[in-house]
Image: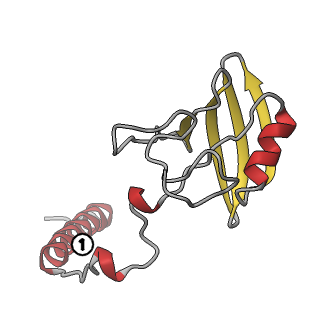
């Protein structure tokens, strides 16, 4: 019986790959992770803690920039596309993309996510789920 060295190497490689695969599966089944509680992480934000931007005036691009600047936004760019206004800005160093209605200035989307109205009764001009008063500039007054 002759032994082919190429076949021996192939068989050894197959055995090594199979052993690695089985060992990985065994470790994955016995590994434990310590998941910290959500309340222990102060960087986690719930929707109740988010303050959505409100436009006091939206007739011109400068009105939009002034309104958002008063609420702490920087590097504001306004692009009007038919019935929507696309606004890109930064607040606290975090870039944000917002979509507003060009007809009434209401917030439609923030970073591709539609704001949720948790109360069911948002006053006119206030973004759904917002806790700000449209009459106050950058205000935190309850509606």
Name the residue located 77 percent from the left edge and 39 percent from the top edge. Answer: 64
Can you tell which quarter of the image residue 9 is in? bottom left
By what rule are the colours in the image chosen?
A: secondary structure
- In this view, 5 is above or below 35: above
Could you say which is closer to the camera, residue 71 or residue 92? 71
Q: Residue 4 placed where, x, y %?
A: 27, 63
In the displayed structure, does residue 5 sit left or right of residue 112? left
Name the residue located 55 percent from the left edge and 59 percent from the top edge. Answer: 141
In the displayed structure, does residue 79 sit left or right of residue 15? right
- In this view, 35 is above or below 121: below
Residue that sits furthest to the right in the current view: 62
| Crowd tier of the residue under label 1, counting other residues whose Cα lies within 10 Å: few below 14, some 14–19, many 20 or above | few
Q: Residue 59 placed where, x, y %?
A: 79, 28
Q: Residue 50 placed where, x, y %?
A: 49, 58
Name the residue located 75 percent from the left edge and 32 percent from the top edge. Answer: 58
Report the residue marked by disc 1: 20
- In this view, 44 is above or below 74: below
The total of numbered circles placed on residues is 1
* Quadrant in which the N terminus is drawn: bottom left
SS at badge 1 = helix
Residue that sits furthest to the top in the current view: 82
Could you say which is closer to the camera, residue 120 or residue 72? 120
Q: Residue 41 placed where, x, y %?
A: 39, 79
Name the residue located 18 percent from the left edge and 78 percent from the top edge. Answer: 27
Can you tell which quarter of the image residue 111 is in? top right
Could you say which is closer to the camera, residue 12 or residue 46? 46
């Amino acid at each position: 019986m002759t032994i082919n060295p190429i076949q021996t190497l192939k068989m050894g490689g197959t055995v090594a790959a199979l052993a690695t695969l089985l060992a990985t599966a065994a470790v994955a089944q016995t590994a434990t992770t310590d998941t910290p509680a959500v309340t222990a992480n102060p960087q986690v934000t719930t929707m109740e803690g988010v303050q959505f931007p409100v436009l006091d005036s939206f007739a011109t691009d400068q009105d939009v920039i002034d309104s958002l600047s008063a609420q702490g936004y920087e590097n504001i760019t306004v692009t009007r596309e038919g019935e929507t206004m696309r606004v890109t800005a930064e607040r606290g160093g975090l870039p944000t993309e917002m979509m507003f209605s060009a007809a009434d200035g209401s917030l439609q989307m923030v970073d591709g996510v539609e704001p949720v109205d948790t109360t069911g009764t948002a006053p006119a001009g206030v973004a759904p789920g917002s806790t700000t008063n449209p009459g106050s500039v950058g205000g935190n007054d309850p509606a």
